Amino acid sequence: MKKVSLKYTHENSIARILLQDGRGNVLDHIMIEELQSLFNDFKGKSDIKLITFEGAGKHFSFGASVEEHKKEFAAAMLKGFHQLFYSLRDLSIPTAAIISGQCLGGGLELALMCNFIFADKTAKFGQPEIALGVFPPPASIILPEKIGLAKAEELLLTGKTISSDEAKSIGLINHVLEDKLSLNAWVDEWICVNIVPKSASSLRFAVKAVRVKFNHVLSNFLPQLEQLYINQLIESHDANEGINSFLEKRKPVWENQ
């Protein structure tokens, strides 16, 4: 079974992507490749006005595969994952993440790349990478752009998880609904009112315009952080200890180097 499914709604103007791996919708290399294939296909579809991302089941995504963060896989994993961000940048199609349950790590990074984030009261948001001895390159760039440096540093350096209400209060997400059912109904109405009446072409120009600085920052700094991760971080003892201890279900033994 595919780890990503796609359906079109609203006369094929809305592309709705569902993450569905059956175990927390982990963004492993298979799911990343399937997403990239969809993004490649979207290049030739000029009628798409919005791409939405949702998670099957109770959770949006537990994040990227920890197994694929191991030293021997890290470079390939980051390259494939970061290409998703470059592809969404280049498409310039408006995007929305619709969140229930856990939205962590790479899952939150994918949501952060979207123009809109809508959630219900079950949603939990966090970048817990620091607890594993690593850091999240896209979030390290996108979070400060979206919510300011002070709040971004709090999330990135503590690794804490926050509720949907707190996420709304700091400007991380746009709207909170009571539960998944009411969230989906609200989003459908929001799409009909705010997206469907617009020109698909003009929406893309508007995304390019509003993100002219954001895209410049992402394009210039994400490659730098990818190299910092691959060439320095993953060569350190503690980054490998953090990943291995998580996989071995034990407490990490830091050497502070």
Image (cartoon, helix red, strand yellow):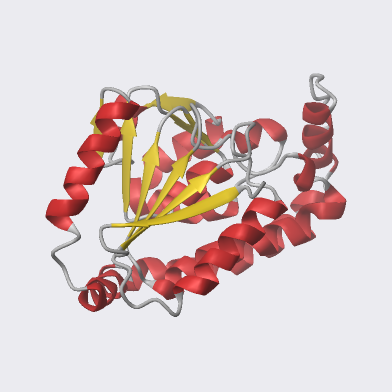
- Looking at the picture, tell me which residue is in the foreground, 160 or 149: 160
Residue 58 drawn at (x, y percent)? 48, 26
Residue 54 drawn at (x, y percent)? 44, 43
Residue 249: in sight, yes or no?
yes
Residue 165 drawn at (x, y percent)? 29, 26
- Looking at the picture, tell me which residue is in the foreground, 133 or 180: 180
Q: Is residue 52 above or below residue 246?
A: below
| Quarter of the C terminus within the rendering | top right
* Residue 187 occupies quadrant: top left
Asked if residue 147 lies left or right of residue 157, the reply is left
Question: What residue is drawn where x is 57% and y is 59%?
Answer: 35
Asked if residue 230 lies left or right of residue 163, the reply is right
Residue 256: in sight, yes or no?
no
Asked if residue 206 lies left or right of residue 155, the reply is left
Q: Is residue 198 above or below residue 103?
A: below
Asked if residue 93 lies left or right of residue 137, the reply is left
Q: Is residue 233 above or below residue 172?
A: below
* Residue 203 occupies quadrant: bottom left
Question: What residue is drawn where x is 77% and y is 60%?
Answer: 75
Question: What residue is drawn where x is 48% and y is 55%?
Answer: 6
Question: What residue is drawn where x is 16% and y is 68%?
Answer: 198
Residue 152 drawn at (x, y percent)? 43, 42
